[in-house]
Image: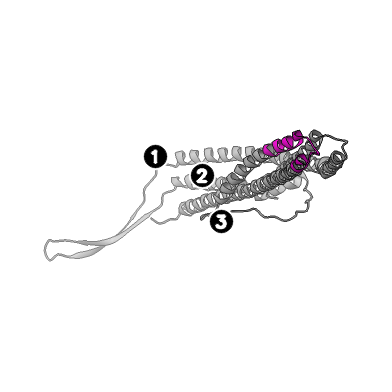
Amino acid sequence: VLPLTGRRGLDARAASARVDAVNSRVDDEIRRLRADLRTAFTDLLAAQTRERELARSRDRLRDLADVLGRREAAGETAGFDRLRADREAIDIEADRAVAATERARAQAMLVSFFPSAPGGVVEAVTTERSMVMLPAVEDLIARAEASQPSLLALGHELEAAALAERAAGRRAIPEPELVAGTKSSNAGTGDTGTVVSLHISLPLFDRGRPERAVALARAAQVRAETAGLRLSLRAQIAGWRDALLARRDNAAAYRTAVTANAEQIERIAQVSYEAGERGILELLDAYRIGASARVRQIALDTAVREAEIELEYVSGW
């Protein structure tokens, strides 16, 4: 076939555009996996920190119970104080055991991202991170529309549909077929000759209308998907940005108002108990409040990091 109408070139360009669309979707899947990996790392880091904080609180209570046990043996305190401290240590240990199972689950989730599981215990290690200023919503949206692989894939598919429509429109133009070969005969001396012919098929009934209709329908579908994705991206970016700012404020406010004062409250309660101004229940309550504040601070900081990861994924920031 002599490709004189250009239809073959249009079909090849359409196929290339569809390949580009697939590659863009692969890039988006990789970006999603990277975001999930970072989330799994954040979860493991939070689980480790939570378990260590609970273990630290348990050890402090056990040390307190030992001191009270010696004082009880010396007749300085009642047995109730030691029993109550032991009970508090047992409760904290139960919470630590639950945190340990969460840490093991987070380790397994993180290891599942790697082709071969590393040997030994997996531990998340990080350094202090400075808070980064957030771009404006419109800047994030512009970045997403320029670099979001899903949008790029739809753009390639729209290009492929347009090329397919142009190729279908040229089916009404006949393309000649050149045939060349040899022909032999067993009659007489068995002569052999050369055959050259030129064929032209007139498309009386096939003018590419079905193919053109399919291409137009696909283009309309892609335009609708693109418009919907743009609206979804705009809503997600605005939502995650607001959520990130709110979570940052909540974490900072809680750290200033509660977490920073937890150790001071514990010291005051300890001194007051030693001076006989407070009972064992008030001392244990101060310990419990301090441990709870630090564990809650871990959850708030983890929520901030998860919002950052999601905002980075949807916007490409």
Is residue 81 shown above or below 48? above
Of 17 and 258, nearer the camera is 258
- As helix, strand or loop, the secondary structure at mark 3 comes to loop
Circle number at residue 120: 3
How far apart are labels 1 and 2 at the CA level? 18 Å
Mark 2 residue type: Glu
Image location of residue 111, percent across then percent down: 56, 51
Left or right: where 65 falls relative to 253: left
Of 21 and 193, nearer the camera is 21
Q: Give yes or no for residue 124 being in the magenta stretch.
A: no
Mark 1 residue type: Phe
The earlier-in-sequence mark between 1 and 3 is: 3
Q: Nearer the viewer, mark 1 or mark 3?
A: 3
Circle number at residue 165: 2
Q: Nearer the viewer, mark 2 or mark 3?
A: 3
Image quarter (top left, top right, bottom left or bottom right) of the N terminus: bottom left
Image location of residue 101, percent across then percent down: 60, 42
* Residue 269 shows in the view: yes
- As helix, strand or loop, the secondary structure at mark 1 comes to loop
The residue under the point 60% across, 37% down is 224
Quadrant position of residue 180: bottom left
Left or right: where 188 falls relative to 151: left
Tell me where the magenta segment starts and ends, as one range. 69-90
Of 307 and 86, nearer the camera is 86
Mark 3 residue type: Gly
The earlier-in-sequence mark between 2 and 3 is: 3
- As helix, strand or loop, the secondary structure at mark 2 comes to helix
Quadrant position of residue 235: top right
Please rate how many residues cluster around mark 2, counting C-alpha atoms within 10 Å: few if below 14, some from 14 to 19, many from 20.
Answer: many
Picture colour scheme: one colour
Q: Where does label 1 land, which residue?
A: 205
